[in-house]
Image (spheres, grey):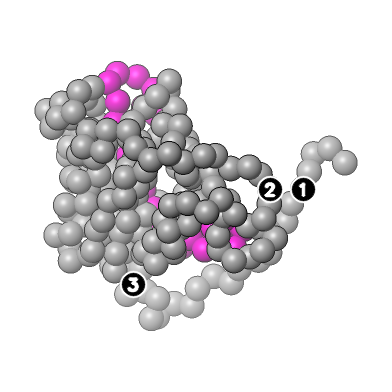
Amino acid sequence: MKVVAFNGSPRKDGNTQHALKVTGGEIVKAGIEFAIINVGNKNIRGCMECGACRKNKNERCVINDEVNDWIHKMKEADGILLGSPVHYAGISGTLKSFLDRAFYVTSSNNYMLRNKIGAAVVALRRSGGTSAFDALNHYLLYSGMIIATANYWNIIYGRDPGEAVKDEEGNQIMRILGRNMAWLLQVLAAGKARVDPVPTESKTYTNFIR
């Protein structure tokens, strides 16, 4: 089993990275492979809403950059962890560009991430954490993923790199999240041999204006 984490911070060694490492440390302790991919320090453009990924069904975005490699890693993984700093009470712009494209591709190709384990974490100086956390969860929920939880919202505090180490409650949240995520992965792996998966249905679209 493996979990892939995506760090949306422009500071690849900042507080978001710390949160992901703390969570990932518990996942590794459970014998599960864990890797972090830094997205926030890359030059990633947003979705063009061309619909080619839905039409072509080739599990790729027509913009040929790192995003397609990352989509493949998401498909291979059993769990996906999203991490972002808080920018204007939302997630980082580069991470949003990546997530918009990646999740459009995965949902347009038979909901590739359905029933994988997902979780999100955010790091911030003061406020806007819950709205950014909510924004990350939108991607996981829309994709039909199973959400891992902790004992509070998955938020850690710190402005300058390294400050999040001092947030004792935030670090506990990340540790509990990592253990819960590992447990869910193990339960899901054990259950697959005994319980048939829920059959899928084609997506129904209803527009409000006709």
Expressed as whole percent of the image width and height from the top left, the position of residue 95 reads 43, 39
Return the residue at label 1. Answer: 206
- Say whether disc 3 or disc 2 marks the residue closer to the N-terminus: 2
Dot 1 amino acid type: Thr
Expressed as whole percent of the image width and height from the top left, the position of residue 38 reads 31, 45
Q: Residue at x 41, y 56 (%)?
A: 70
Q: Residue at x 20, y 46 (%)?
A: 21
**Relative height, residue 35 to residue 168 (above, below):** below
Return the residue at label 3. Answer: 189
Residue 126 falls inside the magenta stretch: yes
Dot 2 amino acid type: Cys
Expressed as whole percent of the image width and height from the top left, the position of residue 134 reads 45, 35
Q: Is residue 160 visible?
A: yes
Q: Residue reaching furthest bottom?
A: 193
Return the residue at label 2. Answer: 50
What label does residue 11 carry, if any?
Answer: none
Contact between labelled residues 2 and 1, with CB atoms less than 8 Å apart: no
Q: Which residues are magenta?
A: 105-131
**Relative height, residue 199 to residue 90 (above, below):** below
Q: Nearer the viewer, residue 137 or 183?
A: 137
Residue 90 falls inside the magenta stretch: no
Q: CA distance from mark 1 to mark 2?
A: 20 Å
